[in-house]
Image (cartoon, rainbow, N blue to C red):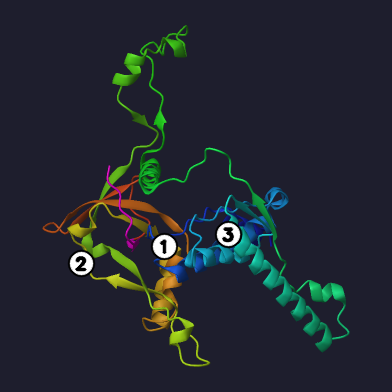
Amino acid sequence: GGANGNASNAAVMTPLVLWYGSMDLTAHPDLYKAQLHKLGTAVEGRLANDVDARASGIIVNTSGLIEDVGYSYILEAIQAFKINVVLVLGHDRLYSMLGTHFKKQAKEEEERKKKMEEEAPQTTPQSSSSTLTPIPKLIKLPRSGGVVSRDAAFRRASRSQSIKRYFYGDILPPKSPDATNANATASSISPTTAATSPLQYQFTPNLIETPIHSLHLHKLTSLSLTASLLPVSSKQSTDPIQITTLPSSEITSKFQHSVWAVCHPSAVEKFERADAASNGGGKKARELFLAGVAGFVVVEKVDAEREMVSLLSPCGGSLPSGHMLVGDVAWME
């Protein structure tokens, strides 16, 4: 029992990073919502095994997209993470929309409660109320004066800096020439010295050369149909999260500067097992896109003549697997 408990705790404490693969949140709504619920389940497991985390709770920061599919993302996040308090910062329309939604939800829950009591009179009020979905408390907060929305250029720069920090880490402060002197202080470092010294980073990424034939690139394709396009009383027959595995001939220089997510070997094993069981169909894509990735690499160069791909990796050694998730995310120094 102890061994299984330790394994379970280790799985819960392992960082979970999911690959969405696009800078457009509206590109793959089915995947985004599925990943929200995956994260919600992981957080729930963490809270169940961590007393301090369970006592402090969680804070979920949703995206600034609030129109159409963005609004559905907010509602999905509230459900996935079992949120009980929703803070709306300086947006009257969103506050009104959520207020209307929660009032409707409360009315539906009350009607469901009455129906349950009528169908099972012997059920105690406490047991029937425990099955109802709790309605979050909605609070509107004023926006601080002088706060402005970040424009597209600022967000692009922040995204690029975050990717660079993943590979290189933060910039280290310059060292003084007199660092070995016990009397040297921070004030002894002149501005000129700091300006002329080459930048030193925390990490040193490595360039890994990998044969093209050893790579398996998986790209998301959405086959979801809206309810209005489906026959009456019919459900989606195929999983809305589908992938296409690109042939080696399509791994060309067009992928230069692309960011790829490296799949965990355990996720690859489940993916191949599901693929074999379903003869190339079914829910195999979920084994990769809903499993945490091992890390990320950037394509520095594709040498078609040598049939090699040069990948910028945050650490040395071989890659955990040759299975990569690709999208439209790119980065160039």
Residue 331 forms part of the magenta stretch: yes
Q: Which residue is mark 3?
A: 94
Q: Residue at x 20, y 59 (%)?
A: 254
Q: Nearer the viewer, residue 329 or 172?
A: 329
Q: What kind of residue is marked 3?
A: Leu
Magenta residue span: 322-333
Could you give the CA–CA distance between mark 3 and mark 1, rounded to whole angstroms?
42 Å
Q: Position of residue 180 (x, y in %)?
A: 41, 12
Q: Which residue is mark 1?
A: 265
- Taking 214 as reference, is 148 left or right? right
Q: Residue at x 29, y 47 (%)?
A: 312
Label located before the other in sequence (2 or 1): 2
The answer to which image quadrant residue 48 occupies is: bottom right
Circle 2 Cα neighbour tier, 10 Å, few/some/many (<14 / 14–19 / ≥20) = few
Q: Position of residue 172 (x, y in %)?
A: 40, 28
Regarding mark 3 in the picture, which secondary structure is present there?
helix
